Amino acid sequence: MQRLQKMLAHCGVGSRRECEEIIEQGRVEVNGRVVTKLGTKVNPDDGIRVDGERVTVERRVYYLLHKPRGYVCTNSDDRGRMRVIDLIPDARRIYTVGRLDEASEGLILLTNDGALTNIVCHPRYQVDKTYRLEVRGPVEPKQLDRIERGVWLAEGKSAPAQVRRVDRQGNRSIITLSVWEGRNRELRRIFAKVALRVTRLARTAIGPLRIDGLEVGAYRRADPRELAFARERMSSDWRPQRVAAPVERRWEERLGRTRAPRRSR
């Protein structure tokens, strides 16, 4: 059994908040009786109607899409901007799992599965998201250390990131890193805190899901077996991994630099 508003949202009636309003307005019937109490538990087999029309549970769908820049990850936008969901011709109510801002690009998972969305997005479940960022100029070891240890943002300290690779191409640096948090524009704000300006940001992976083979704007259906990593976290036996303190990294060596010799006293 699950809460009525959650069931309605899964059926594509509207967002969770919209479904709560519909219930409170007395527009929902369960097995012939009007229900106005939020949190009422229902079964998928119950006869549920909204405004007199039968509501049925939709089959779960999962899409992987290569988001282009200039698109927004929202189902409604009063500014008339291009939406990610418009790139997938599916009549069901699907939504993005997490968000990439309008200026960012890369891998997006879209679904109508609320439980899976919570697993992938909630930092408790530690699903890594991997990004490739371009910044202007060189990167200093102390900047990378701060990114890995976390920096203070308006809403608190960011979780430690894992910097996987740093490359230099002309007057720009390419940084590949993984994080499991998903705060609004978090990476851009973290890099700004260490005086690095992000000029391009692309997500390349969500857990084991990779963007490989997907052209910009293209999508494919995800096999449910590919999402086993998320469903494993739904098990009562799964426990979050303990977050260890970041190890002091020899970034000078990784960046092709050497430490200055200490002066003898």
Image (cartoon, rainbow, N blue to C red):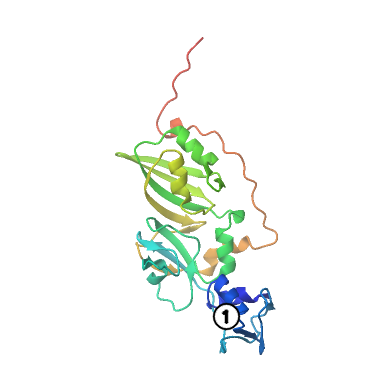
- 88 or 102, which lies in front? 102
Q: Position of residue 75 (x, y in %)?
A: 45, 69
Identify the image quadrant of residue 28. bottom right
Up-down relation of residue 208 to residue 15 (above or below): above
**Rendered residue at 58%/63% (across/down):** 118
Q: Residues within 10 Å of mark 1 (few under 14, many from 20)?
A: some
Helix or strand or loop: what does disc 1 sit on?
Answer: loop
Q: Total label count? A: 1
**Rendered residue at 64%/63% (across/down):** 234
Q: Is residue 198 left or right of residue 47?
A: left
- 237 or 67, which lies in front? 67
Q: In the displayed image of the protein, which residue is found farthest to the top?
A: 265
Q: Is residue 30 left or right of residue 74?
A: right
- 52 or 178, which lies in front? 52
Q: Is residue 203 left or right of residue 10?
A: left
**Rendered residue at 49%/49% (across/down):** 178
Q: Amino acid at mark 1?
A: Val
Up-down relation of residue 256 to residue 231 (above or below): above
Q: In the displayed image of the protein, which residue is found farthest to the left?
A: 170
Q: Position of residue 119 (x, y in %)?
A: 59, 61
The N terminus is located in which quarter?
A: bottom right
Q: Position of residue 29 (x, y in %)?
A: 63, 86
Q: Which residue is mark 1?
A: 57
**Rendered residue at 42%/65% (across/down):** 65
Q: In the displayed image of the protein, which residue is found farthest to the front?
A: 25
